[in-house]
Amino acid sequence: SQTIHQWPATLVQPVGSPLSLECTVEGTSNPNLYWYRQAAGRGLQLLFYSIGIDQISSEVPQNLSASRPQDRQFILSSKKLLLSDSGFYLCAWSRPNTEAFFGQGTRLTVV
Amino acid sequence: GQQLNQSPQSMFIQEGEDVSMNCTSSSIFNTWLWYKQDPGEGPVLLIALYKAGELTSNGRLTAQFGITRKDSFLNISASIPSDVGIYFCAGELRKGSQGNLIFGKGTKLSVKP
């Protein structure tokens, strides 16, 4: 069976510091991978999606970037965090044209 | 951009009552999905719908893919306290649209024992 791991679960970072959130998927190959952000417990905003290694699309301009160094690894990064980057970040995977499955999420607080 | 209108935004019900929520859009979707999110957790898939008119059940949950492909509803029968959470609908616009999974804003369900 497939599993998705996302870490860390919670993170408190100062403004201006870098960010790296990691997500890995097991039990499948060549998954589609996604990063979502959720503000205030409501609404899911798609940030990035990837259909393959080094194939990443950005949905909204922002202070964040994503990379996919391996087939089943997806990383969300920032060089300098802003207060507005605080939120709940979710990684997800899917096979093409099927439902997405989510990780447990990372609660990021920028102080 | 495309939007899903999910309603109601929140519901406060008594244990044992039935619940109904829905999502509508001006766009046509190929897939409708319903997720539940517990506080501090990632959304968990409840039901996936792939064909217009499809009616699917998962225990006390029933969801339907609207015949126009522009809407879907989720019903929960005989609610229990563990049904509390936020329910999201999501739709995929077209085949091959990698990443075009659009989410509603969620319905927050509270169940009073």
Image: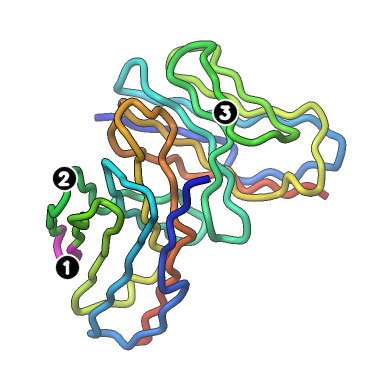
Which contiguous range is marked in magenta?
B58-62
Q: CA distance from mark 2 to mark 1?
A: 21 Å
Q: Is residue A41 left or right of residue A12?
A: left
* SS type, badge 1: loop
Which chain letter matches label 2?
B
From the viewer's perspective, is the residue at label 3 or at label 1 nearer?
1
* Same chain for the residues under marks 2 and 1 in the image: yes
Quarter of the rendering containing residue B59: bottom left
For marks 2 and 1, give the one nearer the viewer: 2
Assess disc 2: are there few (<14), some (14-19) or many (≥20) residues with their C-alpha within 10 Å of its C-alpha.
some
**Residue A75 appears in which quarter of the rendering?**
top right
| Category of crowding for the residue at label 1, using alpha-carbon neighbours closer than 10 angstroms: few (below 14), some (14–19), many (at least 20) | few
Chain of residue at mark 3:
A
Say what amino acid the circle numbered 2 marks. Lys
Q: Is residue A80 left or right of residue A55?
A: right
User: Residue type at mark 1?
Assistant: Arg
Q: Residue A33: image x %, image y %?
A: 45, 27
